Image: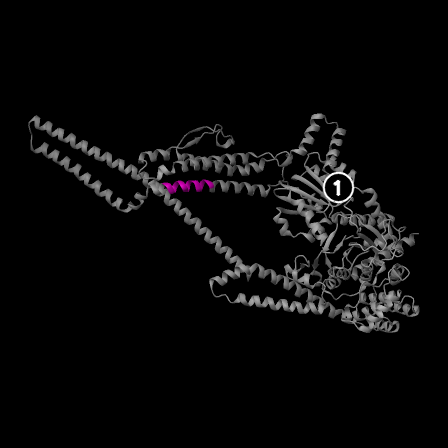
Amino acid sequence: MAKVRDRTEDFKDAVRHTALSLGYDESKLAAILANFIIHKRRQRSPFTKAALKTLESIGTLEHFMLKHRKDYVDLHRTTEQERDSIEHECLKIAWSSGIGGFGWDGVWERLPVSAFIKACQEQIDVLKNSINDEEDTSKGWFGIRADKFNADTVAHKHGVVLSLSERLHSVTSQFDQLRAIRFQDAISKATPRRKFKPVVKSSSEDASKSNNLDVRELDQFRPEPLKVQQQLLDDETRALQVELSSLLDAVQQTETKMVEMSALNHLMATHVLQQAQQIEQLYLQFKCLEMGIGISN
Amino acid sequence: MVLVSAARDYVNRMLQDISGMKVLILDSHTVSTVSVVYSQSELLQKEVFLVELIESTSLSRESMSHLKAVYFLQPTSENIQHLRRQLASPRFGEYHLFFSNILKDTQIHILADSDELEVVQQVQEFYADFVAVDPYHFTLNIPSNHTYMLPAVVDPGNLQHFCDRVVDGIAAVFLAMKRRPIIRYQRTSDVAKRIAQETSKLMYQQESGLFDFRRTEISPLLLVLDRSDDPVTPLLNQWTYQAMVHELIGIQDNKVDLRSLGKFPKDQEEVVLSSEQDSFFKSNMYENFGDIGMNIKRLVDEFQQAAKSNQNIQTIEDMAKFVDNYPEYRKMHGNISKHVTLVTEMSKIVEERKLMLVSQTEQELACNGGQVAAFEAVTNLLNNENISDIDRLRLVMLYALRYEKESPVQLMQLFNKLASRSPKYKPGLVQFLLKQAGVDKRTGDLYGNRDFLNIARNMARGLKGVENVYTQHQPLLFQTMESITKGRLRDVDYPCIGNHFQQGSRPQEVVIFIVGGTTYEESRCVALQNATNSGTRFVLGGSVVLNSKRFLKDLEEAQRIARSSTSVV
């Protein structure tokens, strides 16, 4: 090991000497010397603070999903309704001063998952927009206004935003996977289902039409005594009741099917996005290969 | 080896304790120090993403507070002024200051005064104030090297400056090696005596605490010599690889600039010749030109073998293997084309300047006797149209150094012929050289004709014949080293500073410093001597690394100053 000499002590002495000659009082002197021992930490910019909060909330979302994953997936553990409630149930982090103000309050309440995911996405978008604003107004180190944007820090901020959105995507894709498992039956029976529905509908329509015809026939051709009429009215009401209940069932079924369809739509959208990403990756790889071959030639 | 590893150790320690992204700021001297021992890729591994010179750092206004600044500078007043300005308006988050030599207290006060924003985290002295070009060879790259030739009265300020720089450099070398030596110097040289005295004062009085290392039984030796004691070696043409490249093209900080020789592709304009990084160079740097040719041919054949096997790409596995091996293949290709280019260019120069012919006569002048034959040979070459001016000048100088006292008439004839043939020749240059380094000024037995032992040895050698007529010269340094190993360095010729002298001692570590510059022929001599494991390890250093062009330039510059000063007086 070669010889070195540490002159930091001499330097500190010189600083102390200079401070005394400039007339610093005891407290300032102590502050200066303390700075040598414990280095002042660089202040975190508001951008960094907001980004860290977003990261934290995405983390809690993931945590919640993992916790209820077992319940959600297992077909016999929960009913459809309970699943729906889990989907709609989540943690809400309310912010007091609004999205644009970088001020977050941690208050735990309940809110739909999808809304929550949307909120996270919005937050990320706001961060992205704020990059440009902050560069404009930031004062740089020690209040020296920078003449031009520091390309490194801008690139760093873009990278932070990108990694946050990737994290959100990975969490939502996990969620989509769970949904896919839930609707697996729906996906597999998708085609036959569609054919089934109109048939059911038409039969029910025929049934209702035939009921009406019967009733009108009865009215026209047989001016019966009141008792018979009442019985007929009762029959009518009963038939109407049956019709209404069957319509109600049909409506309920279509509602669930609509929900399923929207979920399937969403799944398809994510699959298409995945494919697009894969295509882009392949393209990039080909580009690299082409460049590599060019260089080696 | 110890100097290269000491310099690397310093740079490592500078960078490893500081976490995060760093910027390294150097000055024009420390950039040489760092570049010969540390490569750019190694700096990147230590998270140094930007390297700047302190002069240009002041010009840029961009603030990069996420970077930590590591400054490695010589403690000169210009650098302190630059630092003052940069500390007053800091661009970086933290400032870590490292200096390559001892800081004066006033300099620390100036820095403390300007650090208003408290950005300085540490101030250290890391004594890497030398350029370790080879394992046993260092240089100080002093620009005003010619100053050593001038007597003190001519320009005392510059001479003081020169001596201070030399003393600081030598001090840094010993601090890096953690040794305090016994100091001896060449009796006939005033500048060597002065440097030896000032070094002794620094090590034993002014900073005796700093140099107080563990004492070994036999102290190491610092021997301060003067270039004028052996003016022949820098004038000769060289035929071993490293020395030849420096003589014909020029090596600076282990880099060769080929741009002056013609058009080259971008990556061959400036090449690196470092024994640390290039194993072919390491095994061939001291070989003869002929042997190098053969070795390069062998290397090219090996490479072609490898290339041919790469051509047989049949399967996917072959392709994968090819892509895996491609970077190494590329590196080998680059290395080989570098050596081939160098050897080709040197062959061209040898052919153009008829150096085979000239060198034969040079070696005769340096080694063998026979004044009449020598005179004839030199006259013939002077008459030869194809010989360049610089070669003619060298021949006359070599003749004059050898046959200074014999037949002055013929010497005069040669001077006149030289003046008439070479239009750019500065008259009186050879006489100036003789005044500096003539036989009266020399201590050592340059031609082996003072000592009976040497005369006998020369006769024996003459009878035996030489292996290679172009490399028969051995620098005077070889004899000096031999005397040291045997403990027979005469006190009369090389007195000791102070009273530490141990009669007949054989030191184990010796640093020889040649004021005025070393040559690669001498560093080769030292390396070969160290390889014999004689029990003594030699390290060679100088104010610059000379070739004949540099030596002549220093001579001309000194003559010009000497002339102008006498005219004023």
Q: Which residue is mark 1?
A: B80
| Residue A175 painted magenta | yes
In this rendering, the answer to whether B66 lies above or below B491 is: above
On screen, residue B432 versus residue A242, left or right, reads right
Q: Secondary structure at mark 1?
A: helix
Q: Chain of mark 1?
A: B
In this rendering, the answer to whether A163 lies above or below A231 is: below
Magenta span: predominant SS is helix
Q: Amino acid at mark 1?
A: Ile
Q: Residue at x 66, y 66 (%)?
A: B340
Mark 1, other Cα within 10 Å: few <14 / some 14–19 / many ≥20: some
On screen, residue B163 versus residue A11, left or right, reads right
Towards the viewer: B72 or B83: B72
Where does residue A9 sit, x and y in percent of width and height? 73, 36
Where does residue A24 sit, x and y in percent of width and height? 73, 27
| Residue A286 painted magenta | no
Q: Which residues are magenta?
A: A167-178
Where does residue B31 sit, x and y in percent of width and height? 70, 50
Residue A39, quarter of the rendered image? top right
Towards the viewer: B487 or A146: B487
Residue B554, quarter of the rendered image? bottom right
Regarding residue B420, the answer to whether it shows in the image is: no
Towards the viewer: A76 or A113: A76
Where does residue B201 sit, x and y in percent of width and height? 84, 45
On screen, residue B47 versus residue B207, left or right, reads left
Q: Residue at x 81, y 61 (%)?
A: B482
On screen, residue B376 versus residue B314, left or right, reads right
Residue A22, quarter of the rendered image? top right
